[in-house]
Image (cartoon, grey):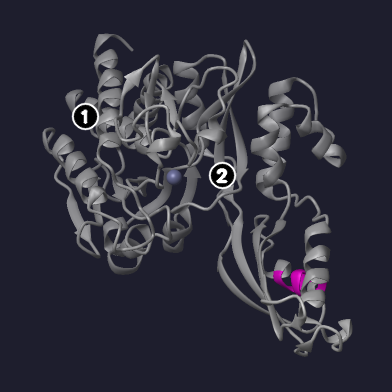
Amino acid sequence: MGEHHDAMAAEAVEFCSALIHIDSTNTGDPATTGDGESRCAEYIQSLLAEFGLEGELLEKAAGRGNLVVRMKGSDPDAPALLVHGHTDVVPANRADWTMDPFSGEVNDGFVWGRGAVDMKDMLAMTVAAVRQLRRENFVPQRDIVFAFVADEEIAGEFGAQFLVDEHPDLFHGVTEAIGEIGGFSLQVRDDLRLYLLGVAEKGVAWATLTARGTTGHGSIVPNGSNAVARLSSALARISEHKWPVVRSASLSALVEQLGGALGRPLDIERLDDELASLGLLAAMLLPGLRTSTVPTQFYAGYKTNVVPGTATATVDCRIAPGTDDEFKKQFMDLLGPGIEVSWEDGRSLEAPARGALLETMQTAITAVDPAGKALPFVMSGATDAKAFSQLGINCYGFSPLRLPEGFDFAGMFHGIDERVPVAAIHAGTRILHRFLSAQ
Ligand SMILES: [Zn+2]
């Protein structure tokens, strides 16, 4: 703690604001995605270079910069840690916002703007913590690799996936990683704030379904060979299916530790009810319990009295950890015959939900927030961890933020008036600094 840590925390806020001010919108279309990611990477590079850390800038395409910096440890044989974050943000429509989404304004106790929680806050906290570690002449025991990457919001083709495919040597020796999403707190009582640590990530499988049938006049072709009818009844079965709770190692750690934190054991047979009673916590924890299959788009036909020959639909499937293979078989069984499926997918991930790294996170949290208790959870979204895990790295969601009671953190992601409390960044930077000091 102390004054120099106040300076570190202030720098984190300043850097967060400055990064938001660099518009790094990723539209998914190369024609309209500018060079904001490279400008963010160059800005971070200059902040670290002031403290003698020279990184490497890598671009798969002009403007889509990635910065990778290795902080050497004293033991070259020790397995290394990766700290990663993405510089790109999703689009923001100025007209919907109270303030300019790219102002980075600090106002009313918040840093405002696109990327405030997703995830320029973490980039800024990381840079501020590293600068502080250098001021302290800290040398970690193991190497720490920092990766500031482009293109997370689309598929990582220009970011994490590019680095993993074309520059895997940059991650030599890395066995563990921290990044989004996790490390934020949810207040349960005055004396209990749960910091959710991402230990697993659901699989993502986007299905495109196609049904084919007999085309013809609406007064003649019967329902039995009607593509629209067949596909819609299959979608109804998928949508109504109640997927079972998957008792992964992450879930059992969660149940045990949540019970410990609340001071009463949870009934695993009634987990939905148990979690539903926990308010904001429920929204974060419930999706991790089981697979979900949600129909999202449907296309067929062009005229009321013409039966179309095909109908297509998309389903957003999120698969509980460790069940990727059996899921697809069950999904096909639910669909029934006569429907073709194509997949675009990324497998689920699960890192150990107990161990030294998680204990270090808890120690760092406790040092800054004595009411803070770490809780492993299953992330429902997909992140760059999907790419880094291809290198055999155990990935954790740990971007620490101490949030005020009732703050709608989940609603901030990709939301209008995205903002992050200044106090949350202050505490988060201290937690991160403490965590990195123990590496
Ligand atoms: Zn993100």
Give the SS element for disc 1: helix
In this picture, which residue range is highlighted in magenta? 328-334
Magenta span dominant secondary structure: helix
Is residue 141 or residue 275 the one in the foreground? 275
- Figure check: 249 above or below 112: below
| Amino acid marked by disc 2 | Val
Horizontal and vertical percent position of residue 210: 68, 79
Dot 2 surroundings within 10 Å: few (below 14), some, or many (20 or more)? many
Percent across and percent down for residue 362 are 51, 27
Q: Which residue is mark 1?
A: 131
Residue contact between numbered discs 1 and 2, judged by CB atoms under 8 Å: no
Residue 332 located within the stretch drawn in magenta: yes
Location of the N terminus (image quadrant):
top left
Q: Say if disc 2 is inside 8 Å of ligand 1.
A: no
- The quarter of the rendering in which ligand 1 is drawn is top left
**Residue for badge 2:** 199
Q: CA distance from mark 1 to mark 2?
A: 28 Å
**Residue visible at 87% across and 41% down?**
269
Tell me the residue at 59%/43% (across/down): 353
Q: Quadrant of residue 387?
A: bottom left
**How many marks can you see?**
2
Image coords of residue 83 (percent x, y): 36, 43
